[in-house]
Amino acid sequence: MHRIEIGLKENIKDPRGDGIKSRIKDELGILVDSVRTINIFTLNFELPKEQVHFIAKELFRDKVIECYSFDKSLAKSREFDFLIEKGFKPGVTDNIGKTAKKNIEFYLDEKLDDEKKVFYSVQYLIKGNISKEQLKIISKSVIGNELIENFIFFDKDEFMEKGIGYPMPIVKGDSQIKVDTFDLSKYTDEELLKLSRDRCLALDLKELALIRDHFLDVERLEVREKIGLSKMTDVELEVFAQTWSEHCKHKEFDGIVHYSDLETGEEETINSIFKTYIKNSTMEIKKKLGNDDFLIKMFNDNAGIVKYDEDTNFVFKVETHNSPSALDPYGGAITGIVGVNRDPAGTGRSGAVPLFNTNVFCFGDPFYKAKLPPNTLHPMVIFKGVHTGVRDGGNQSGIPTLNGSLYFDNRYMGKPLVYCGTGALMPSQINGEEVSKKIIKPGYLALMSGGRVGKDGIHGVTMSSEERHSGTPVTAVQIGDAITQKVMLDYIFEMGQKNWIKAITDNGGGGLSSSMGEIARISGGVDVDLKKVPLKYHGLQPWEIFISESQERMTFVIDPVDLDKVMELAKKRDVEVSVIGKFTDSGYLNLLYGSQKVAQIEMEFLHEGLPKKEIIAEWKKPKHVEPDFDEPELVLLELKKLLSALNICSKEYIVRPYDHEVKGRTIIKPLSGVKNDGPSDASVMAPKLDSREALVIGHGLCPRYSDIDAYHMSACAFDEMVRNIIATGGKITDLENDEVVMWSINDNFCTPDSIYDEIKNPDGKLKFANIVRANKALYDYTTAYNIPCTSGKDSMKNDYKYIDENGESVRIAVPLTLLYSGACKIKDYRKCVTIDFKKSGDLVYILGETKKELGAGEYFNLHGFIGNDVPKVDADSAIKMYKSVGRAMDDSFIESCHDCSDGGLGIALAESAFSGGLGADIDLSKISKKGIDRNDHLLFSESQSRFVVSIKPENKVKFEEMMEGNVFSEVGKVIDEPMFIVKKLNQEIEKIGLQILKESWQKLLRFDLPLENIR
Amino acid sequence: MKVKALIPTGLGFNCEYESAKAFEMAGAESTIVDIRDIIDGDVNIFDYDVIMLIGGFSYGDDLGSGKAIANLLRFKKINGERFIDLIKKFVVDEKKVVLGICNGFQVLIKLGILPGFDENYEDQNSSLALNDSGRYEDRWVNLKFNSESNCIATKGIDEMYIPVRHGEGKIIANDDVMEKIMDNNQYIAQYINPETKKIAVKYPINPNGSTNAIAGLSDETGRIFGLMPHPEANLLFENHPHWTRLKRDYEDKGMKIPEHGDGLKIFKNIVEYLEGVKK
């Protein structure tokens, strides 16, 4: 055993330590004098002393800035009061340890065997007068996460006396292989339910009874007895639990819904909301597109595939990774982003290469001061962890983060929502064969590549199908490793180009169980030997191997004739690849462990045997208190306040650490304007540098509208996505004029538990009615705009339940949250427009009509109200407007264009002004409006389908001609003076300094500035 | 014969696409290879005129940026020869060019190839440390190029606006080394305040706290150089974050809108220089 320690020289600044120091102050309100850090590498094997010395001095140390020691503590010669050593818990992915071992191999010029390991840990040397109790709080809330990391504490005297030894997180497992069997004939209903609970299976009685009857069928028993599988094995039970989980099966979106509208008295039975609204919409649009149909493959692969140009397809997928991010924000989020990269990579025959990432997060108030619910992390801790995780995942993979947002509401305190998306490019053909199609013939081989399998993420799928409770297993957390994945995907794409891969899929939720179970349907069966799966450590049982969610793994299929080449390249590229199975047409999913048969499952029953769930939904429009506050005297002071609202304020300091231009093809960046700090409505990326064609990428999200009516929430979120894209240069399909525009949309639902239960979920019927209504709007508006959903996902039961101090059961449920993410292809990126005002003297227009629609909006929220007038979308006038705006942009008549959403046109005008570093002089009485007689309502109404536009004065006539037939009005002009001036409805003038507005907008989430104490 | 550029990638490097395009747009021919194909001897660097070590996160920067790949290149022999000896031959004997951008620059520094005093390319004497801000940032910066530098790639370039995208870009060296870098004019560019044109001391115009605001270095031959900011990220006029504003300025002045971004000049200089060598 050896311990190598590397620390910065004492005269070198330690920004990592400084960062911890300021977080201790900002997040805990504890003052310490200084924090310094030391990196530790612990080797569990022996090497000659000279070699250890060389490794420390030459390999691990940067001799200009660092010093080293080996088998002797560096800290002993340093000044400190307290020392914390943080290392991973057994079995947690240790990327740095892994790289350190590789470097030792470079030096020794030999491969070290699997049992030889290097473990990474960090020491934090703290100077300051704090208590041991505080030290523990600092450890678990700032320095690390108890769930995945161990901490050792010392004060200086203890440390000098005892030293630290050689702590190592070695997995101690029983390597005895054991397959449990269940004699289902002896199980009562109660016992079945207990079995499901004890094993975290999330199966209900109806499902369990079906499984029991299946296995007790006399004929089947006979067949099974012959192969020595008379009783159901634990492997089989787990496969059913995975495949029938909500996560994989979408039981609610595919169920039979009995929906009644108590407002109108209408009743209907909906057989699958997914098929009725989402799939049907896309199929109808496909029909309408006719010869210009760009929809290649929808809803039956890891992501939808559309045609980008003659030789390239575009693949776009958005996913959620909520439950893991609640437990370990960093690990959960990095797994979310690198996980969604694998969806396009696992689509079609040999995958699509990631082009860009997107992300949207919903959190509780990061400045929340009251007591937290038990076993939850503070929203700020979740925020920072998720942000860092997504940043590292995207940046290290070399994929630009182009679009996203943050949304705050305390109903996300139980389960934060972490949406991650990836757009990717796929060649249409390789060697004349369609890359969109998977080909699997009996006899083809199943190979697994990438990371090894551990207990990571076991039961992740069944957990995400259940509400969180205090006993959620720790193994439900995985930590992604972007580099392992990148190296593996490089290898996959290299093979893809050589046409060696016949089919591919990723191992995500449900692990091999989901990927093999799904892909084997193509040939009609598969035999898998679980003993061939490489493990991180001993002690995994066959069922654990099959359902583990260890990351960075792809399953791919080859013709056996290519095996040697595939393995040779794997060796060259240093990617671990194993042949784990062979496809058949037997109709069975056969699992072996070496020579022992551990499962034989009929594929048909596995995939088709589950009857549809029946769900009751009842819609009655909720009535909220109508706001009664008077119009404030100074409307621009309200504007200033609103600019500081969490859902409106600047997110620059979240965006800045994302690489948004690697690959060199980003044309409109997330931040724009004269100081690169304006909030772009959408981003633009050119997939190919030798063409001016590009993709405009945007999204829409407005969950609070669900508090009034999720129909309009869905309509508004969809319209917001479309108009963000239109504002930046996107175009809308115009069938009358034969202009078809490629769009690819993801709809991602995150719902609260919406299954009615008299005691546990008394408003379940209304919640499900909201889900139905959101889908009705999805259908109505996607078909009206001819913009198809090409992929999507539903994540159900985003609730957190706990027992409070008074013994009462409390439920935190998210509002029904629907994210639309879209990409739209444009012909010439030089026609794109940004939000910032460009020149003094330019004329300012508001396009679209402003109605009294402040319900569930940001302005009412600021005053503590919800209200009832939720914004509504008029599809016909919106489409007309978008076509006109598109033509005006094509003719270069628009200098700036900004969509009006949260906070209305007041916010949009202010953002266009300060992003351009120019003032604005606006006459509010000129704004086209309906039913509004107050300045505040006019400025902050969230009516949809509106834009703030500026144009050159010389283009006035032509621009207005072009906009004819739409509601629009010239409202003022851009001025040099850095002031925001409005003439109010009563002709009074009110002014405020531009810088005051901008500062108010910027100050809240600046992480480079000290935050107030949040606890 | 066209100038041939070699772009090694793999192991976590990730800027191969735009780097290859940069050379192509400058008139060269680009070849992207896996760096392990060079180490295995399948690709011979001497078939090429310029090697660009690109940006990315080689080995996740797990032992410090560029360090793990520097260790790999240090200990793995290529057909029995050390990487450093091959580079020396490539640059000193054959007068070819090696550049490192971002992670590539970090590798060159950690190997000791830069600043490479007196043709000693194997003793690391400078480093690129964690940014003072403690974090990775994507931020456009204003650079002033050193007119006294003999770097072949920066000739005739005065200022440039390109992005930094790194977490570890703060140049640190002992006083004597830093003095020599300054005296020898081996710093090729510095971060400046765009308004005053003075050397940038403070964050964010000095994005990482680099000593003397240095953004890049060259060796004494001027044929090996490294930069933290990314010139290959500004190849098109529309890569510029304010292009929609600049376009308006050009229109108002009645001027033609340029096609290319500033960053391309560096690649054009390299190709022009190598065309001269090839003649």
Image: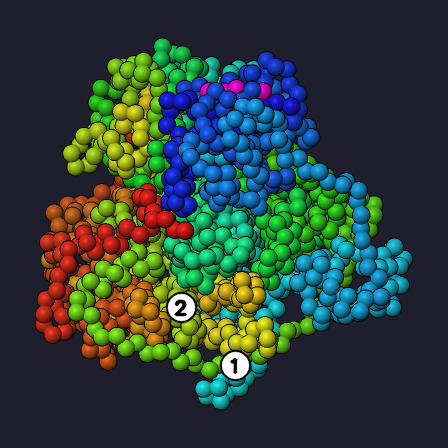
Percent of width and height locating residue A390: 46, 47
Number of numbered discs visible in the structure rendering: 2
Q: Dot 1 surroundings within 10 Å: few (below 14), some, or many (20 or more)?
A: many
Q: Residue furthest bottom?
A: A265
- Taken as a whole, is the magenta stretch helix, strand or loop? strand
Figure quadrant of residue B151: top left
Mark 1: amino acid: Glu
Name the disc covering residue A704, or none.
Answer: 2
Figure quadrant of residue B112: top left
Camera-side residue of A732 and B27: A732
The answer to whether residue A474 is seen in the rendering is: yes
Percent of width and height locating residue A610: 69, 69
Q: How is the image coloured?
A: rainbow
The answer to whether residue B143 is seen in the rendering is: no
Identify whether A927 is placed above or below B193: below
Which portion, as a residue range, is magenta?
A67-71
Chain identifier of the residue bearing label 2 in the image: A
Q: Residue at x 59, y 75 (%)?
A: A759
Q: Secondary structure at mark 2?
A: helix
- The residue labelled by disc 1 is A618
Mark 2: amino acid: Arg
Magenta stretch: includes residue A309: no
User: B76 left or right of A611?
Assistant: left
User: A316 left or right of A218?
Assistant: left
Mark 2 or mark 1: whose residue is earlier in sequence: 1
Q: CA distance from mark 2 to mark 1?
A: 20 Å
Magenta stretch: includes residue A69: yes
Percent of width and height locating residue B161: 25, 37
Camera-side residue of A164 and B55: A164
Chain identifier of the residue bearing label 1 in the image: A
